[in-house]
Image (spheres, helix red, strand yellow):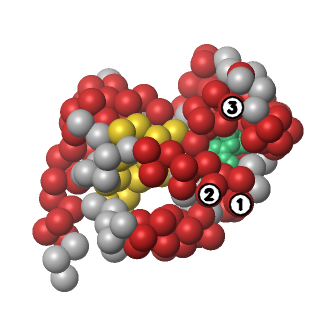
């Protein structure tokens, strides 16, 4: 199964991607985690990405796509859960090209739906270095401006899931939603 998770910061993409990867025996690919690992290891990519992450801005597309290309080439082609990528229509087109190189495709794109007031609470409770009010606001703005247009880009494969409630229930809702996706997609 090849899935993309889309949702605003705090929607729970990382948590759900981890659980889905386990249940579906797929690789979890989080661009946020990859950037943070590069930063921790002080690689040139990590150092380049740092100022964007600290400001809540998107890391430039070429750096991000190059990193994803590398990671995708390492995972078995039978499955992945992408978390945090693509984040713009341009990145989505880049992903399409990457997948076309291996004649593969996305099975579904899952939108995690959470009301805004719940999001800020969750992020403040998490307390990552970029989880301070000003940067959270900026990340939410970037989500509205740059990432939300993706929902339209992916409308044929899109399933929207209510992502408020117990973590396991949300995973079950996602699994139920993606299993019906092939029928919805059969035109
Ligand atoms: P969140 O979704 O909670 O904002 P992430 O861990 O997914 O957190 O991302 C943290 C930061 O990493 C983003 O604010 C951005 O700077 C960078 N980043 C992650 N994914 C991408 C991407 N696909 N394109 C550009 N920048 C990204």
Q: Is residue 62 above or below residue 152?
A: above
Residue 131: horizontal and vertical position, in percent? Answer: 71, 26
Q: Is residue 38 visible?
A: yes
User: In the structure shown, which secondary structural element does the residue marked by tag 2 occupy?
Assistant: helix
Give the residue drawn at x 83%, y 42%.
Answer: 48
- Which mark is on residue 159? none
Number of numbered markers: 3
Query: Residue under circle 2?
Result: 65
Mark 3 closeness class: few <14, some 14–19, many ≥20 residues within 10 Å: some
Does the Cβ of the disc 2 residue fall within 8 Å of ligand 1? no
Q: Is residue 11 above or below residue 5?
A: above
Distance CA(mark 3)–CA(mark 1): 16 Å
Q: Which residue is mark 1?
A: 62
Q: Is residue 101 above or below residue 179?
A: below
- At x 32% / y 66%, what residue is drawn? 104
What residue did someone put label 3 on? 38
State the image coordinates of residue 7 (x, y, percent, origin top left): 51, 48
Which numbered disc flags the more N-terminal residue, 3 or 1? Answer: 3
Image coords of residue 126 (percent x, y): 60, 19
In this rendered view, identify the residue nearer to me: 70 or 55: 70
In the figure, is residue 67 to the left or right of 76? Answer: right
Kindly identify the residue that appears in the image at 54 percent across and 55 percent down.
69
Q: Are marks 1 and 2 in contact (CB under 8 Å)?
A: yes
Q: CA distance from mark 3 to mark 2?
A: 15 Å
Residue 20 seen from this side: no
**Residue lying at 67% horizontally and 18% vertically, measured from the top left:** 127
Image location of residue 44, percent across then percent down: 80, 38
Q: Residue furthest bottom?
A: 187
Image quadrant where residue 46 sits: top right
Sequence-earlier tag: 3 or 2 = 3
Q: Secondary structure at mark 3?
A: helix
């Amino acid at each position: 199964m090849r899935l993309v998770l889309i949702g605003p910061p705090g929607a729970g993409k990382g948590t759900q991607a981890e659980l889905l990867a386990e249940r579906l025996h797929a690789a979890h690919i989080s661009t946020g985690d990859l950037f943070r690992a590069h930063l921790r290891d002080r690689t040139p990519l990590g150092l380049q990405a740092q100022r964007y992450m600290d400001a809540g801005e998107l890391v430039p597309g070429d750096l991000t796509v190059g990193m994803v290309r590398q990671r995708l080439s390492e995972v078995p082609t039978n499955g992945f859960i992408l978390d945090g990528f693509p984040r713009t229509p341009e990145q989505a087109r880049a992903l399409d090209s990457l997948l076309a190189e291996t004649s593969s495709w996305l099975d579904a794109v899952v939108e995690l739906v959470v009301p805004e007031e719940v999001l800020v609470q969750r992020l403040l409770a998490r307390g990552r270095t970029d989880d301070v009010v000003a940067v959270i606001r900026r990340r939410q703005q970037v989500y509205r401006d740059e990432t939300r247009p993706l929902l339209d880009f992916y409308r044929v494969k899109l399933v929207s899931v209510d992502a408020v409630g117990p973590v396991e229930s949300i995973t079950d809702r996602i699994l139920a939603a993606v299993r019906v996706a092939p029928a919805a997609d059969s035109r």
